Amino acid sequence: MESERPLILVTNDDSISSKGIRSLYEAVLPFGDIIVIAPDSPQSGMGHAITINDPLRMEEVDALGGVGVYSCSGTPVDCVKLGISEVMHQKPDLIVSGINHGANTATNVLYSGTMSAAIEGAMEGIPSIGFSLDSFDPRADFTVAMKVVEKIVKEALENGIPTGNCLNVNIPYVQQEDFKGLKVCRQANAYWEDRFDKRLDHHNRTYYWLTGDFKDQKEQTDTDVYWISKGYATVVPTQFDMTAYDIMEKIENWNI
């Protein structure tokens, strides 16, 4: 007999060994039957990349204190695809990705491997959620984040997420007493103002480190960047259809 409990796929981009994925696994464990498939090494900034020029490897590992945990040589999107096709042999009821070390507010969603796993789920018609904590500390305290995960997952399983959409959830790095609650809001118009740190290696060859500053263009008060700075976790409904419908007619009037 098939289980009546929801089947939940857990993944991330910080690797199978990160504290964030352990926290996510523990938070969703009461809600269903869990399968974990995550990269064997950090894949931050990979966006929606897939592996096509190298073989993919996947093995079951003794990690996270449970069964059904797999380490994959590929990207977060590879993990979702392999999980559906080769491990579960069916679509799960829910995909959760994270808990990412570092926020994925504003246009960071375009670069994030964590959010790309959730977006891949949305493309497959699967309710999916990406969770990120506003701290890059590998030993960060995920207590508040886990409570947010529990609340959002419970609501998502009970109410569903409209097909073709996923949720981008960002959690402030605050103590429980300073946590203000949740805000459903929009993505900020903010991005990285890139700079490159140019250096020379010991062979006198040039190499570069990407760096820069995160700039909020309009600093409006209804966005994820604003509310997370005020101590709120933000929930941004996200879609993969990037068509700019409002200018279609204008482009149709070009002489093309």
Image: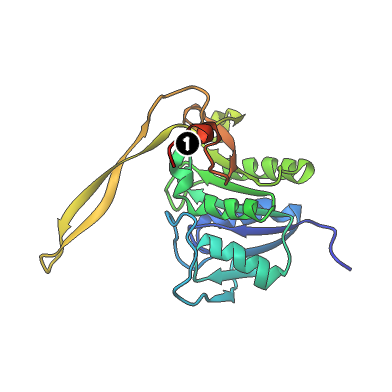
| Relative to 62, 47 lies left or right | left
Residue shown at 45% from the left, 40% from the top: 107
Q: Could you tell me which quadrant the N terminus lies in?
A: bottom right
Residue shown at 51% from the left, 50% from the top: 100
Where disc 1 sits, the SS reads: helix
Residue sitting nearer the eye, 141 or 107: 107
How many marks are shown on the rendered structure?
Answer: 1
Residue shown at 54% from the left, 40% from the top: 170
Residue type for callout 1: Ile
Instruction: Find residue 235 and report its image quarter.
Output: top right
- How far across and down, in percent of the image, does residue 236 sit? 58, 36
Q: In the image, is residue 41 above or below residue 142?
A: below
Residue sitting nearer the eye, 20 or 111: 111
Considering every residue shown, the one lying at the far front of the view is 255
Residue sitting nearer the eye, 61 or 225: 225
- How far across and down, in percent of the image, does residue 145 sit? 58, 43
Considering every residue shown, the one lying at the far top of the view is 221
Q: In the image, is residue 202 above or below residue 185?
A: below
| Relative to 47, 28 lies left or right | right
Instruction: Find residue 215 and report its image quarter.
Output: top left
- How far across and down, in percent of the image, does residue 33 sit? 75, 61
- Residue 64 makes an appearance in the image: no
Disc 1 marks which residue?
A: 251
| Relative to 90, 61 lies left or right | left
Q: Could you tell me which quadrant the C terminus lies in?
A: top left
Considering every residue shown, the one lying at the far left of the view is 204
Q: In the image, is residue 168 above or below residue 210?
A: above
Residue shown at 81% from the left, 57% from the top: 5
- How far across and down, in percent of the image, does residue 137 sit? 42, 49
